[in-house]
Structure formats: C-alpha cells, structure tokens
Amino acid sequence: MKFSFAPHTIYFKRPFKISHGMRTSTPIVITQLECDGVIGYGEASLPPYLVETQESVFVFLNRASKLLALYKTPDKLEEIIKQVDLLAPFNTAAKASVDIALHDLYGKLHNIPCWKMFNADKNATPNTSFTFGIDTPEILKNKVEETREYKILKIKLNGEDDKLTINTIRSVTDKPIAIDVNQGWKNKFEALKMIEWLENKNVLFVEQPLPKENIEDAFWLFQNSPLPIFADEAIQRYSDIESIKHCYDGINIKFMKCGGMFEAHRMIERARELNLKILLGCMSETSCAISAAAQLSPLINYADLDGSLLIKNDLFDGVRFVNGKIMLDDLPGIGAFQKV
Ligand code: MG
C-alpha cells in the first residue's frame, strides 16, 4: 500500500514477520514517512498476545496519513504527535510507528541525532540485559555460554520450577540477573517467600510478580519485599503512573505500550520526579525500533533492548552492542538503515 500527498509521503510496508527461529514469529509493520526526499522509518511490533494486528495498524496509518497531509514538515513534532494520539484510543504500536518515523525524519532533516533532541549524553548508555525464556536446564546452561558478552541476564519465571531455573543459572554464572515473572505468581505470600529466597542471589529487581489488577497485593508486596519490584503489564502509558506509583519501585517503559519516543520521554521525566527506577524494554523488534529506544537509553537505569538480537531476519542495521553496552553514534535521527 502506498499513500502519497505532497510533501509528505507515507508508505506502509507489506506485512512482515520477524522470526525467532523455527516456530515463532512476530508480525510487524514498518512505516516510512518522506519529506523533501528524506525518509524517516518507524516500526509497529505486534506480539500475538496483544490486541493490535497488522490490519488494525493499516487502518490507523490510513487515518494518520490524512492528518499528516495537513502539515508541510515534521517541524511541529510535538503538536503532530499529540494530534496523532487523538486520532483513536489505544493503537499504541501503530502510534509508536508514526512517532518513531517522525523523530527519525525530523532528526535527518535537521541533521541531529535523536539522543541530542532529548538532551541525553551519548556516552552514558547502559548495558542491555539478554533475555532467557523458560527452558530446560540443559538449554539454559548453553545460553549462558552463548551470551557470555552480556553483563546482565533477564530470566523469565512462571511459578513452576523457578528454583530449579535459578539454581541452574547460578551453577554456571554469578552475573547480575533481572527476574521477569509476567504476572505468573498468583499468591502474594508465596511471591514474598520466593523473593526472600532470591534476595542473596545477585538479583537486580523482580518485574511484575503478581497479576496487574491486584493493586492492594502489589502495595503489600512492595512494602515487604527486600528486592525492588518493577511494573510492566501494570503500566502502559504516562497516565498510568499516578495510579501505580505507590506500589512499585520502578517501571518498565516500552514504546509499543506507550506510543513512542515522545511519551516514553515524558514518562522518564515523571518517573525521575517520583524517584521511580526506570527500565526501558521492548517487544520482538527490528533494529529500527530498537535503535530508536537506544536513543533514550542514557536517561534510564536499566535497558532490556535485546529485541533485535533475538530475531533471525532483521530488516535494519542500527544500534550496536559492544560487550552488551549500547553504543550510540552521531548519525541523525534514530541511526537505523534499511538493509538492502
Ligand atoms: Mg516484562
């Protein structure tokens, strides 16, 4: 599909799936925004467990193209992004694809890297964690070996065989680990017992231990836990921060949840004011969206930006990782290039 109007042109790439190996894949949509012959790239990643689909992204982008046609350049960046947000509720991945493309385009037209647009120090980037899914001890041990260059591991737990998983990891490495439970622990007392067991095992924090709806249990666990507790599923957008700020030590911000770079930056600023720790995470994404997220990484405490490292058919070259550390350069925009 191609939608043209002067001077912007918005192209929607054909539906594409990024693959994680033999069996699993994630649908994405790459958005291109053109102005004066310069192209800004954006991406919507659509994991099957969320509500957006490639079709819903196309419907949203169709609406967005009509709005963007009213602007001659992306110079009124903030105004355009706010207007895009008002086009329809939800659709945050679709909104993120427009937001990222707008930032990339603006940066390229003004020859400025996005990290500079957000007053970030390009040398202050964190290490990304590398994520381990739930697997057999044998596979987990192999993965520790394969990911030696990464300094932080993110381990998924689900309430089954959790101690075996951690003991397996700890039998082969003493690296710091982040725990992500994805709401998998159902009882707050058992959750606390497990966290107390994890306390002296070099664990940085525990992400979303309980179901997101259980605000009271989250508050109880936050008060009693010896380890920091981070919200992921319990926080989507800026407007959610106030309702959960007393129940967590930190928040996991993702572009696909919040609508992109502009809102993620607002969330970072608000979280800092509230003394909340900040994790910047991702879905399965190509180096397009990951490079965009990397631009904000100097402003946060922890990065979990391994999305492009876990796929086999990346469409972009972009941010590099050196021994797990995110490397930013002086390229304008998000610093990602479509592979030829
Ligand atoms: Mg999570």
Image (cartoon, rainbow, N blue to C red):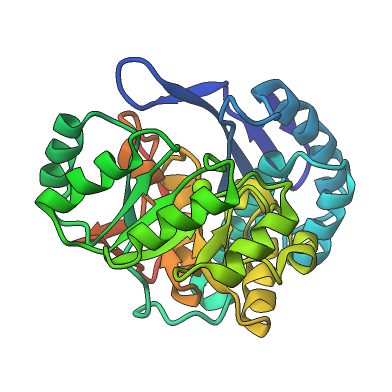
Compared with 292, 181 (above or below) is: above
> What is the total number of numbered labels drawn onto the structure image?
0
Query: Which residue is depicted at the point 15% across and 56% down?
Result: 149
Query: Which residue is depicted at the point 79% across and 39% down?
Result: 65
Residue 249 visible somewhere in the drawing: no
Residue 73 vs residue 191, the one in the foreground: 191
Estimate the x, y position of residue 203 in percent, counting from the top left: 33, 63
Query: Which residue is depicted at the point 71% across and 21% down?
Result: 55
Compared with 243, 254 (above or below) is: above
Residue 41 vs residue 257, the one in the foreground: 257
Report the side of 48 relative to 92 (left or right): left
Which residue is farthest top? 23
Res 174 quadrant in image: bottom left
Instruction: Please state, as top left, top right, bottom left or bottom right, where the N terminus lies in the image.
Output: top right
Estimate the x, y position of residue 101 in percent, counting from the top left: 61, 50
Compared with 58, 33 (above or below) is: below
Residue 170 visible somewhere in the drawing: yes
Residue 142 vs residue 24, the one in the foreground: 142
Compared with 2, 231 (above or below) is: below
Estimate the x, y position of residue 48 in percent, counting from the top left: 58, 24
Residue 106 vs residue 318, the one in the foreground: 318
Instruction: Please state, as top left, top right, bottom left or bottom right, where the C terminus lies in the image.
Output: top left
Estimate the x, y position of residue 155 in percent, counting from the top left: 34, 47
Res 143 quadrant in image: top left
